[in-house]
């Protein structure tokens, strides 16, 4: 005889109970994979033993919460926040800054996966769009990597040793105009969004984003220089990098 299916009810909508989906929900709240699958299996086993074949979603989540609080109390708070986020109609925008090679792209992809956000934009892509719209003669700093910027590329007089820093900040300011346009459209249209990249610099991104209830901003820092260096070689092996790792290493201090 076929085993009966457990049906989860929420607001008149019915869906089959899925251990995989429930485990994924727990993982999104930060619980470990093994714990997530264990709790999902235990909840299903309890419902089957009680012959509860039609259950409200709130009851399932309450059972999950009771089990989770005994195993990982911190994850309980994250689960509650995740539920609030899931039920909210407000958009969520996450801005992740950090130097090249520290892992902003990896973190952005992981955040998007956990929060089920479909749109992930890199600031390098925004800079590329601006490059096609603005000629090198008009804005040369936009067409170079920040560590390649020279004194003559600047519109204001700076010392040669300050050219990279001033050039980078000038480039970041231009790119952040594009970032602002994308973020404002996302907020207006209710689109969840993750933006990551080296150009998201405190003091350059609009200050109103820091206290905005829909926007989360963070900067990734890798304190170990040796680990940071090794990231460029790992990236070179795992992706078709446009530049060899040695070029980044040669300008490592400017990147840091």
Image: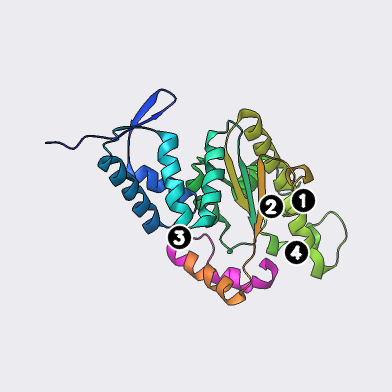
Residue depicted at x 41% and y 47%:
24
Closer to the N terminus: mark 3 or mark 1? 1
C-alpha separation, residue under disc 4 versus residue under disc 2: 16 Å
Note whether 184 is above or below 41 in the view shown.
Answer: above
The answer to whether residue 140 is visible is: no
Q: What residue is shown with label 4?
A: 164
x, y percent for residue 12: 41, 22
Which marked residue is nearer to the observer: mark 4 or mark 2? Answer: 2
Q: What secondary structure is found at the residue carrying circle 1?
A: loop
**Which residues, given as a range, are shown in magenta?**
236-256
Single out the residue that lies furthest toward the top.
Answer: 12
Q: Which residue is mark 1?
A: 204
Name the N-terminal-most of marks 1 and 4: 4
Q: CA distance from mark 2 to mark 3?
A: 23 Å
Mark 1 to mark 2 CA distance (whole Å): 7 Å
Nearest to viewer (mark 3 / mark 1):
1
Is 200 located above or below residue 149 in the figure?
A: above
Which badge, 2 or 3, comes first in the chain's sequence? Answer: 2
Q: Is residue 35 left or right of residue 192?
A: left
Q: Is residue 231 visible?
A: yes
Of all residues, the one furthest to the right in this rendering is 157
Q: Identify residue for label 2.
A: 200
Distance from Cα at disc 3 to Cα at disc 4: 27 Å
Q: Which-is-in-front pick, marks 2 and 3?
A: 2
Q: Within 10 angstroms of label 1, few (less than 14), some, or many (20 or more) residues?
A: some
The residue that disc 3 covers is: 239
Quadrant where the image shows the N terminus: top left
Instruction: Find out whether residue 237 is within the magenta segment.
Output: yes
């Amino acid at each position: 005889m076929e085993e009966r299916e457990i049906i989860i009810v929420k607001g008149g909508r019915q869906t089959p109970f899925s251990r995989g989906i429930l485990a994924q929900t727990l993982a999104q709240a930060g619980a470990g994979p093994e714990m997530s699958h264990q709790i999902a299996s235990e909840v299903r086993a309890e419902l089957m033993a009680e012959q509860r074949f039609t259950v409200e979603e709130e009851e399932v989540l309450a059972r999950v919460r009771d089990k989770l609080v005994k195993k990982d109390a911190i994850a309980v708070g994250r689960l509650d926040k995740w539920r609030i986020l899931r039920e909210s109609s407000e958009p969520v925008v996450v801005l992740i800054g950090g130097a090249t090679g520290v892992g902003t792209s990896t973190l952005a992809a992981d955040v998007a996966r956990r929060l089920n956000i479909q749109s992930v934009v890199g600031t390098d892509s925004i800079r590329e769009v601006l490059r096609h719209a603005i000629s090198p003669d008009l804005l040369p700093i936009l067409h170079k990597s920040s560590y390649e910027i020279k004194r003559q590329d600047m519109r204001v007089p700076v010392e040669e040793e300050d050219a990279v820093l001033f050039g980078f900040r000038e480039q970041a300011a231009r790119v952040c105009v594009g970032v602002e346009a994308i973020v404002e459209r996302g907020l207006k249209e209710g689109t969840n969004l993750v933006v990551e990249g080296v150009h998201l610099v405190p003091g350059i991104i609009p200050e109103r984003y820091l206290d905005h209830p829909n926007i989360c901003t963070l900067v990734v820092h890798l304190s170990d220089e040796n680990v940071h260096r090794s990231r460029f070689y790992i990236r070179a092996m795992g992706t078709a990098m446009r530049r060899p790792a040695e070029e980044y290493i040669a300008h490592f201090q400017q990147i840091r």
